[in-house]
Amino acid sequence: MTDQITDPILIVEDEVRLAELLSDYLRAAGYDTEHLAVGDGVVDWVRAQQPALLLLDLMLPGRDGLSICKELRRFSTLPIIMTTAKVEEIDRLLGLELGADDYICKPYSPREVVARVKAVLRRHGAERSRLPDAAPLALRPEQLRVTANEREIELSAVEFALLQTLFDAPGRIFSRQQLMSRIYQDNRIVSDRTIDSHIKKLRRRLTELHPQRELIHSVYGVGYRYEDREG
């Protein structure tokens, strides 16, 4: 039984058979998975897709796991479990000091990995629920960043424009068409689902700042509005 996780677990592992084995065990435990075999592009993938957890190998073609972990920690509290064949204590300490939540040495049992994933996700959820939750959002348009509770996230240009539109008019209901016209000023044609997808990702990012508050509310059949209240 999973912890009600709907977003995928990203497996970054260059050993394809091992990645497939981990994926099979995680799926059997009720989790969705995605796989990348090289380090290049992992940070961009995480920004765009917002996985529930990252299983990150230390030694990868292209970019190594430690540098990936270090960059992710500049903008994200994403749970990270590092996996590696290196067993020296200095490597373990370095991985944890850079922000990894856990560290598993190869060879390992896939069942152990599943157990570690469940434990980290539970711990991560509990830690987030204890964060202070009263600080208002502070938007920094020049950097596409939002801060609150001594935490900071970086948004895409579209996500930031969407948040800025709603944030500047709290309580006002914006239709999807109004949001599309504000965000896509080049008159491109996009569907309602595009806005819904951006809203979903934006909500997910905002929970990193305010775990106990719902900030963007759906108005059935109409659109969305910004309102700061406890969820």
Image (spheres, helix red, strand yellow):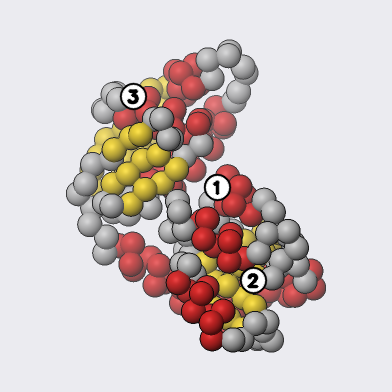
* Other residues around mark 3 within 10 Å, as few (<14) / some (14–19) / many (≥20): some
Please name whichever residue, 230 or 93, is drawn nearer the observer in this view of the structure.
Answer: 93
* Other residues around mark 2 within 10 Å, as few (<14) / some (14–19) / many (≥20): many
Q: Position of residue 122 (x, y in %)?
A: 41, 71
Q: Is residue 75 above or below residue 95?
A: above
- Is residue 29 visible in the rendered structure shown here? no
- Is residue 140 visible in the rendered structure shown here? yes
Q: Amino acid at mark 2?
A: Leu
Image side of residue 35 versus residue 206, left or right:
right
Give the residue at x 38% y 52%: 208
Give the residue at x 65% y 70%: 57
* Other residues around mark 1 within 10 Å, as few (<14) / some (14–19) / many (≥20): some
Find the distance from the CA under tag 3 to the CA under tag 2. 46 Å
Image side of residue 142 versus residue 169, left or right:
right
Give the residue at x 35% y 34%: 140
Find the distance from the CA under tag 2 to the CA under tag 1. 20 Å
Q: Is residue 5 above or below residue 177?
A: below
Q: Which mark is residue 58?
A: 2
Q: Position of residue 149 (x, y in %)?
A: 26, 51
Q: Amino acid at mark 3?
A: Ile
Q: Are marks 1 and 3 in contact (CB under 8 Å)?
A: no
How many labels, in total?
A: 3
Please name whichever residue, 115 or 90, is drawn nearer the observer in this view of the structure.
Answer: 90
Q: Position of residue 84 (x, y in %)?
A: 64, 78
